[in-house]
Amino acid sequence: MADTGVYTIQERLMVNVWVLEKQRTGETYEEIRENFFNRFSKAVPSGANLQKLEKKTFSSTGSVLDAKRSGTPKKYVDDDVGDRLNASLKRSPMKSTGKR
């Protein structure tokens, strides 16, 4: 299963390192957030999300990857199906979706 999180694995690992070293270095969450923005130039996780990520990695799952979600996975329409659907719409635009 592909990881669908907002942040890459590298970004999550760096956040964990910074949060773990927070006690030793005396940095605040605001400084960690600033470091994140300076390094990755993208939206910064909130202080609460920094704590959640660290807790997930070291207490809950032991991984920076997202946990497997329950339920039916999304089904994506591949290009071939989209092309066939467009062709069908052009051939007979009045045909119902059920019959199509």
Image (cartoon, rainbow, N blue to C red):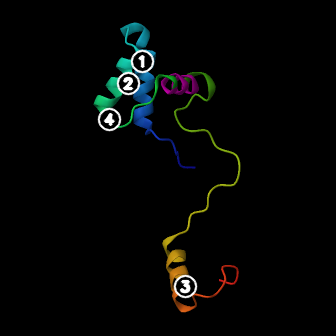
Determine whether the residue tagged by mark 4 lies in a helix, strand or loop. helix
- The residues colored magenta run 49-57
For the C terminus, the image quarter is: bottom right
Determine whether the residue tagged by mark 3 lies in a helix, strand or loop. helix
| Residue 93 x %, y % | 57, 87
Other-residue count near label 1 (Cα within 10 Å), few / some / many at <14 / 14–19 / ≥20: some
Q: Label 2 belongs to which residue?
A: 33
Determine whether the residue tagged by mark 1 lies in a helix, strand or loop. helix
Give above or below for 82 relative to 6.
below
Q: CA distance from mark 1 to mark 4?
A: 16 Å
Amino acid type, mark 3: Leu
Give above or below for 76 relative to 56.
below
Amino acid type, mark 2: Arg
Q: Label 4 belongs to which residue?
A: 40
| Dots 4, 3 in contact, CB < 8 A | no
Q: Label 1 belongs to which residue?
A: 29
| Dots 1, 2 in contact, CB < 8 A | yes
Q: Label 3 belongs to which residue?
A: 89
Q: CA distance from mark 4 to mark 3?
A: 44 Å
Other-residue count near label 4 (Cα within 10 Å), few / some / many at <14 / 14–19 / ≥20: few
Query: Going from the N terminus, do you reach mark 1 or mark 4 first?
Result: 1
Query: Going from the N terminus, do you reach mark 1 or mark 3 first?
Result: 1
Point 38% across, 8% down: residue = 26
Q: CA distance from mark 3 to mark 2?
A: 50 Å
Query: Going from the N terminus, do you reach mark 3 or mark 2 first?
Result: 2
The mark lying in front, picked from 1 and 4, is 1
